[in-house]
Structure formats: structure tokens, C-alpha cells
Amino acid sequence: MKKTVRIFTLILFGFITNLYAQKTVKPNILFIAIDDLKPVLGCYGDAMIKTPNIDLLAQAGTVFMSNYCQQAVCGPTRASLMTGKRPDYTKVWDLKTPMRDVNPDILSLPQYFISQGYSTQGIGKVYDPRNVDKEIDKPSWSVPYYKTDKKYYAAETGEPALNFYQLPATKKIAEQYLNEAKVKGLSNKEANDYALSKIKPSVESADVADNAYNDGANILQAKDILVQLSKSKQPFFFAVGIAKPHLPFVAPKKYWDLYKREDMPLAAFQGKSKNAVDIAYHNSGEIRAYTDIPPLTSFTDQKDFGLTLPIEKQKELIHGYYAAVSYSDALVGQLLHTLDSLGLRKNTIIILWGDHGWHLGDHNLWCKHTNFEQATHAPLIISAPGMKHNQTNAMTEFVDVFPTLCDLAGIAIPQNLDGKSLVPLMKNPGSSIKEFSVSQYPRSGAQSETERQGYASANYMGYSIRTNRYRYTIWMGNKFRTDQAFKKEFIVGTELYDYQKDPNETVNVVNDVLYKTISNDMHQKMIDFFKSQEKNK
């Protein structure tokens, strides 16, 4: 009898211990970053795009319909997301400032998770490499950041030429220019840059395997890394960066074949807003660097802003963007399938985000680099164990990611973060955690800015607050930043757009008498925001 009681007690103790252990097991995190991905996804209401894998993820998670980036260019917005701090704190406003050179003690999201017992690993573009050290921010990773292993490229094609291209004709021309560069005694990087100045098409449709391009090779490697992570008892934070649909729009032909060129949706409004603030616009300098673009401008009448392209080229670029999005979606599908096959999904938080939006001809603009809706609106999807599918229209922004992942993982949220946990919205999508989201973008105000590609001097900064209905933007001169006291005389322009009446931002109504109360209210919100940031400097 005593033996039976003892055995029963041991079994009961083991059950309770196991139950407690299950409750205290920390969830894994699969962190998927997609470059230049705007909310052109089925789960965001786009009826044309083919994104079945991301849409399936959305059905298992929360879709944040009104999510905004901190600055519509890769380096700054990624630095903000990865640290939970706004650009005026990170001091990363361009594509050349190393984050820890100007802010050595800043705490990154994966760095904090290391202190909480996590293995943190990464591959692909998560940070912008120009804004971190050669180890892709060494403090963030518990093992050295993975580089693409050449063995994962398709054997029949090998690595892409100049890092991008697989069409035989392009590869042949690229090789000729690379040989020319070697004769000139240029280094490998200089030779690559020289060749790209001669041959750099904005699109490519090649009948090749997914892993003929860098993203496809990286995903195959990421799948193997997931297998290794599944064998460890230590929880993981695994960051996977996908570069497409960033320019050039290269993708295997099968993804181009999902769409018809004639069906591509041209931007409805390709002009400058009435009562516009000129400094809000740019000349689409990033895309002008592609060698097939300048010849088009020679016979197309150019407006004094943006980039005016022939209709057929617009359709080709939009076609390429859609194809690249579908290519990235297929790669996401491979990751999720691997996660499922390893039995990891039930204890893994999955977050998928695109770092900012992208202009596809609206306002006669291409690329990002503005405070307009098409550049700042960015997708965010989070799936977590125990959370039901939801969709919320509440205002959110990328500085909210850091505290949200801490909350979902059951670990303490650092005190000084600028964002808020989105878990209340995941539980109650009809609720709200903030009145507005904030984006910003710098302008140099110099003629040379028309040629820059995301780099910015410190002369002007536009701050933009987005509520559910309105966007108010204030452009400040005199090198103003939010750690300084606001001065009215620094204002060089203001904008107000009403998305309920004017979703394409065709009229700036900031001085319209009918919007006087709204303008004053939004202006006060901006001033209050400035004061809150000045206190947190």
C-alpha cells in the first residue's frame, strides 16, 4: 500500500512538474523582415496580388491594418524597429551612419532577448548593413550572423551576376565590364560598382529556380538553420530577411506569369497635390540609377518633381513589383512549412513586416523617401500561441514591435522604449492604444538632392502624424530635431490630408477654412509630441 502511494505521489509530482515546465517554456520567435514590401497583400485587401502563404499566416494571427514606419527608407526604419526608439533618438536618418557609432549603448531587440536566455540568430537583410558593423550588429546575435553559403545556389545557374541578375545576356555583358574593371586595376567592389554603372536593368524575368537568386538561397539555408534550432532546448529568436521586392525587380519567370501586363493598376493620381509643399517631393533618385531608366526620360516630358515614365514602363515596373512580392511570398511559405514539419509552430511567435511602403507612380513618384501614405504605410502581421485571428484598424507603428514581442514572450519590457505593446489589440481588435502614429523624413533642400538615393543632410526634417482619418505634416528647418525646443519660426511648410474624402492626397487642406479646427487640433498634437520627445532626450 505504501509502495503504491509512493508511486502515485511520484507520478503526481512528475505531472505537476511537467505542467509547470510547459507553462514556463519560453516561446520561440521567427522574425521575418521583407524589404520594400508595402501592404499589397491579399490580407490587406488587394484583390490582384497572389500571396497565399502570407495570407494563410494572417489567418492565424493579427493583421495590423493601420501600421506605419518611422522613416520611409531602409536603414532608419529598421534601426527604430530593432531598438524600439525613434530616429531622433537612434540618430540614424540616412544610409551611412553606423547606429552604435552615434549611440554606443543602445539596446537592440535581439540583444535584449539574449539576456533573457534566448539564442538569437539571423540571415538576410534584417538591419541595413550600412548602418551597423561588419558583423551586422555583433551585440544582437548569440552566434555570428550567417552569410549566404554558395552551396545553396541552384547548380545550373550559380550565383547571380552583380548580385542580382541571371539572364544569360545580362550576365555576359556584366562579365565584359568586370573584366574591363580588372584591367583598370579596380578592387572587387569597385569593379562591381563599375559594371553596375554600365548594366543595371530595373527588372528581370528569368526561367530559373527560386534559389538562383540570393533570397531563394538564403531561405534554403534558413530552413537548415531551423532544423538545427529545433534540436536545442534553448528558445530561439531567428531573424530572416528577404530582399525582394526591393529594386531591381528580379524574380523567377513563374511569378511574372501569375499576372498579365495589361492588367497592372496604374496610379490614379500622378500629380502634385493642390497647395503642395514642394519639399515633400523628390525626384525618384533611387530608380534613376538603373541603366534602363535615363533613356526613357530623354523622350518623355518630365515634370518638375518625381519621375515621369511612359505608360508601358510603369506597367512593367508594377508587374515586376507584383512578381517580386509573389516570389517573396513563396519563400515565406517554405519557411512556414519547415516550421510546421518540425512541430515548432505551436510554440513559436511569428512576426512578418515590410520595412516601409513604396511609391508606384502616385504623385509621379517612385521608390519611398516621403511622408506620404504610400511610403509610410507598412504591413505588420503577428501570430502567437494562444492568440486568435484578428484584424485591427487601430493605429500602430514599428516602435511597438519590441515591447510587443517582450509581452508575448512573457518577459519584462524595458522601461525606456518609445512604443507600446500591441497585445491588447491582439486580444481586443476594437480597442486603441494610441491616437496617432509618427513618421518623419529629412530633406537637404539642395539641388544635388535630386541625385541622392536615400542619403540625407541635416537641414530640414518633416514630421508627420497619422490618425485614423487625417495626416498632418510639419516641415522644420534650421536642423531642428525633437530633442530641441520647438520654435514656430523654424516651420517651412505644413500639410493636412483628409483620407475619408481624399484617399489619394490630391489636396492639401491645411489652410482651408473648413478644416481650421482640425488643422489647429493636429498642430497642437504635433507640438505636444515634440514636447514629449524633448523630455525623453
Image (cartoon, helix red, strand yellow):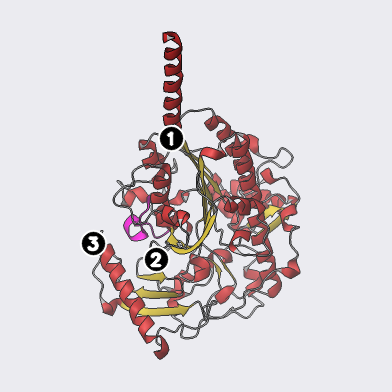
Task: Count the numbered circles shown.
Answer: 3
136 or 392, which lies in front? 392
Alpha-carbon span between mark 2 and mark 3: 17 Å
Name the residue rendered at 61%, 52% in the picture.
Answer: 54
- Local packing at callout 3 (Cα closer than 10 Å; few below 14, some 14-19, many 20+) is few
Q: In the structure shown, which secondary structural element does the residue marked by tag 3 occupy?
A: helix
**What is the three-letter code of the residue carrying label 2?**
Val
Camera-nearest label, 1 or 2? 1
Which of the two discs, 3 and 1, sits closer to the camera?
1
10 Å crowding of disc 2: few (<14), some (14-19), many (20+):
many
Judging by the rendered image, the residue that carries numbered circle 2 is 438
Q: Is residue 473 above or below residue 186?
A: below
- Using the rendered view, name the quadrant where residue 216 is placed: top right
Towards the viewer: 96 or 487: 487
Label 3 sits on residue = 535
Q: Residues within 10 Å of mark 1 (few under 14, many from 20)?
A: few
Which residue corresponds to mark 1?
A: 23
392 with respect to 195 (left or right): left
Secondary element under disc 2, as helix, strand or loop, is: strand
Q: Position of residue 172 (x, y in %)?
A: 72, 50
Q: Amino acid at mark 3?
A: Lys
The x, y position of residue 69, in whole percent, is 45, 61
Quadrant of the image for the C terminus? bottom left
* Amino acid on which disc 1 is placed: Lys
Query: Can see residue 274?
Result: yes
Q: Is residue 356 above or below residue 139?
A: below
Q: Are marks 2 and 3 in contact (CB under 8 Å)?
A: no
Q: Specify start and end residues of the magenta stretch as a single range.
A: 83-94
